Amino acid sequence: MAPRPAVKLNDVVLPPQMIAAEAQHHPSQTPAAAFQAAARALIIRTLLLEEAKRDAIAVEPELVAPGKRELDDEARIRALMEMRIPVVEPSEDQCRAFYDADPSRFRSPDLYEASHILFLAHPHDVEAYAGAVARAEAVIAELRRSPQRFEAIAREQSECDSKANGGRLGQIVPGETVPEFEKALEGLKEGEIAALPVRSRFGAHILKLDARAHGETLPFDYVRDQIESYLAEQQWRRDVAAYIERLVSRAKIEGVEMSPSMGKAA
């Protein structure tokens, strides 16, 4: 295998060890692709830090998480971006046009009221899990004959704390339960009991949809601030990418192909 060409920025070689260390943060299909992505990221970072040094930017690293502050270089790049690339707020007309293009994007989530009967089992315990599924199937067969017994059976057999309420879970919005549970809810009609056990990491569920309130399109005034923030961020990202492309175009770069999406590496 031919050795990789040296990666140079303005005739200065970037140490291969530095690029290899950075490559750990750029998962790719091949080591060569990870190396290239890491080299691009280091070049962009170096160019930005040189700009910050040229502007004599002095910063105080900010707190980014409890007990964790930015690194000095991260703080310098953040301050450089804040100074060179101001946030441009979109106009009222731009926000309205974005909303009017597809109001259905701005919907309140569907709201479910559901009940379940749970037979606990860990998926890794194959025998116990199969037993939980079999128990659920037997109860579903009984409920086909006597659906009105759902609450009573939940109180008698469910292994979830909701058994005290006859299996009732109350109101549920998307994201509050496991994906398998939500997918099953979406396919049920009000009052319907799922024909098959719902399998999750907790075990086997017998699911009943008690009620559903469909989400509604939210009015423009309700989501205007959200749209304004989104459009401002998207414009800022485009401006950052354009700024980085200008820096790259003025630099002498060898040994790596700078991609059109290189602005993402900042």
Image (cartoon, rainbow, N blue to C red):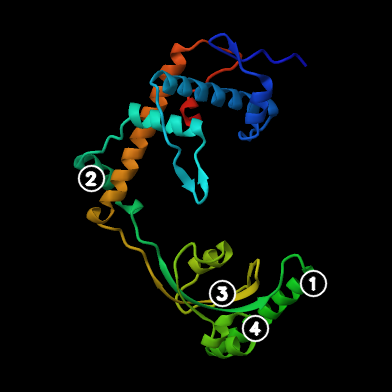
Q: CA distance from mark 4 to mark 1?
A: 19 Å
* Disc number for residue 253: none
Q: Amino acid at mark 1?
A: Glu
Total labels: the figure holds: 4
Horizontally, is 36 left or right of 219 in the view?
Answer: right
Q: Residues within 10 Å of mark 2 (few under 14, many from 20)?
A: some
From the top left corner, tell me how far across and down residue 27 is, in percent: 63, 35
* Disc number for residue 194: 3
The numbered mark, 4 or 2, whose residue comes first in the sequence reads 2
Mark 4 vs mark 1, foreground winner is 1
- Evaluate whether residue 94 shows in this view: yes
Q: CA distance from mark 2 to mark 1?
A: 57 Å
The quarter in which the N terminus is drawn is: top right
The numbered mark, 2 or 1, whose residue comes first in the sequence reads 2
Q: Amino acid at mark 3?
A: Ala
User: Residue at point 34% right, 26% down?
Assistant: 84
Q: Which residue is mark 4?
A: 139
The numbered mark, 1 or 3, whose residue comes first in the sequence reads 1
Mark 1 vs mark 3, foreground winner is 1
- Evaluate whether residue 259 shows in this view: no
Q: Amino acid at mark 2?
A: Arg
* Disc number for residue 96: 2
Disc 2 secondary structure class:
helix
Q: Amino acid at mark 4?
A: Val
User: Residue at point 40% right, 65% down?
Assistant: 110
Disc 1 secondary structure class:
helix
Of residues 134 and 229, the one drawn nearer to the viewer in this rendering: 229
| Image position of 122 with respect to 142: above or below | above
The numbered mark, 3 or 2, whose residue comes first in the sequence reads 2
Of residues 72 and 177, the one drawn nearer to the viewer in this rendering: 72
Disc 4 secondary structure class:
helix
